[in-house]
Amino acid sequence: MTDARVGLTVTHRRYVPYNHAHYAGNLVDGAYALALFGDVATEVCIRADGDEGLFAGYSNVAFTAPIKAGDVLEITATVTKVGNRSRTLDFECRVVCRGRPTAPAGSAEPTVSESAAEVLDPPIVAVAATGAVVVPQPR
């Protein structure tokens, strides 16, 4: 019998402010996504178990594309396994919007404003991970 919590998915969206950029090209460090995974995992624990729970660790993390200041991120956590106190979660951080202050190279399109941005279709998967959280034993 499968636990009803398996498949529970929670999604957050977050704009990445420019003051979070640490590297040339307005790049944001990978730890930024991991902190967002912690936030979405907290909501998963609340919804699944009525407790904020604690993050136990990651078994896999893959940084597959850059996150930049000005991005809009969609962060998703899905419960894939339920133990007595542990929950295994799959995480994905996708870039759904990105700043585009200049026209693409070779484009006949005129230069756009410094604050121009676009919706990415399809989104870019920037970070994927598998992690575990623990919640208190039910009383």
Image (tube, rainbow, N blue to C red):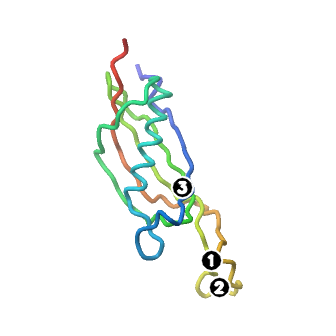
Q: CA distance from mark 1 to mark 2?
A: 13 Å
Give the residue type that dot 3 points to: Leu
User: At 32% across and 24% down in the image, what residue appears?
Assistant: 85
Which residue is labeled 1 in the image?
Answer: 101
User: At 62% across and 77% down in the image, what residue appears?
Assistant: 101
**Answer yes or no: do the residues labelled 3 and 1 have beta carbons within 8 Å?**
no
Residue 73 — which label?
A: 3
Count all numbered tags in the image, as a single digit.
3
Q: CA distance from mark 2 to mark 3?
A: 26 Å
Mark 2, other Cα within 10 Å: few <14 / some 14–19 / many ≥20: few
Q: Please name whichever residue, 20 or 83, is drawn nearer the observer in this view of the structure.
A: 20
User: At 54% across and 43% down in the image, what residue appears?
Assistant: 11
Question: Measured from the top left, where is residue 60 in percent x and y?
Answer: 30, 49
Q: CA distance from mark 3 to mark 1?
A: 18 Å
**Answer yes or no: do the residues labelled 2 and 3 have beta carbons within 8 Å?**
no
In this image, 58 relative to 28: left or right?
left
Which residue is labeled 2 in the image?
Answer: 107
Which of discs 1 and 2 lies nearer the camera? The answer is 1
Give the residue type that dot 1 points to: Pro
Q: What element does badge 3 sit on? A: strand
Spot the residue most to the top: 139
Question: Measured from the top left, where is residue 7 in percent x and y?
Answer: 48, 33
Relative to 21, does residue 60 appear above or below in the rendering?
above
